[in-house]
Image: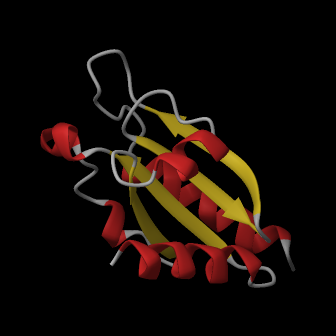
Amino acid sequence: MNKIILMLLAFSLSASAQIVVTEFNAEWNAANKVEWIDKLSDCDITKVDIGKELKLQQEHKVVIVPTIIIFKDGEEIKRYQADLSFKMLATRKEIQEFINEQIMSDF
């Protein structure tokens, strides 16, 4: 299963003009997972458990969970991090508006 996640993430990041939203979290923080992330539109969504994917945590310098990173053309363009209580402050609306702006900027 972990290899499938890595392959999907690698494939998604290499897709041209593709927006990928990745939620980094941990099993021990499941109570604070971002419930609405699968409802975002016009993007691919991946999830990384930093307890199982230490290399991805280190590569993307994730220091608090959950962290949401938005990639475009394989490059990080925006990062949203939880507060000190491990709760995501960014809203679905805020992140969707950012995704929409990125899509519109391509036209």
Q: Quadrant of residue 84?
A: top left
Q: Residue at x 53, y 38 (%)?
A: 80
Q: Residue at x 53, y 44 (%)?
A: 57
Pick whichever, 64 or 96, lies toward us. 64
Q: Residue at x 29, y 26 (%)?
A: 86
Question: What is the x, y in percent for residue 69?
Answer: 57, 50
Question: What is the x, y in percent for residue 96?
Answer: 50, 60
Question: What is the x, y in percent for residue 17?
Answer: 79, 80
Pick whichever, 76 or 49, lies toward us. 49
Answer yes or no: is residue 85 visible.
yes
Q: Is residue 41 left or right of residue 20?
A: left
The extreme top residue here reads 84
Pick whichever, 102 or 31, lies toward us. 31
Q: Is residue 16 left or right of residue 30?
A: right
Quadrant location of the N terminus in the rendered image: bottom left
The extreme left residue here reads 31
User: Across the whole image, how many numbered discs are drawn on residues?
Assistant: 0
Examine the rendered structure and indicate whether residue 73 appears above or below residue 28. below
Question: What is the x, y in percent for residue 60?
Answer: 63, 44
Examine the rendered structure and indicate whether residue 80 appears above or below residue 13. above
The colour scheme of the drawn protein is: secondary structure
Q: Is residue 26 left or right of residue 29?
A: right
Quadrant location of the C terminus in the rendered image: bottom right
Q: Quadrant of residue 47?
A: bottom left
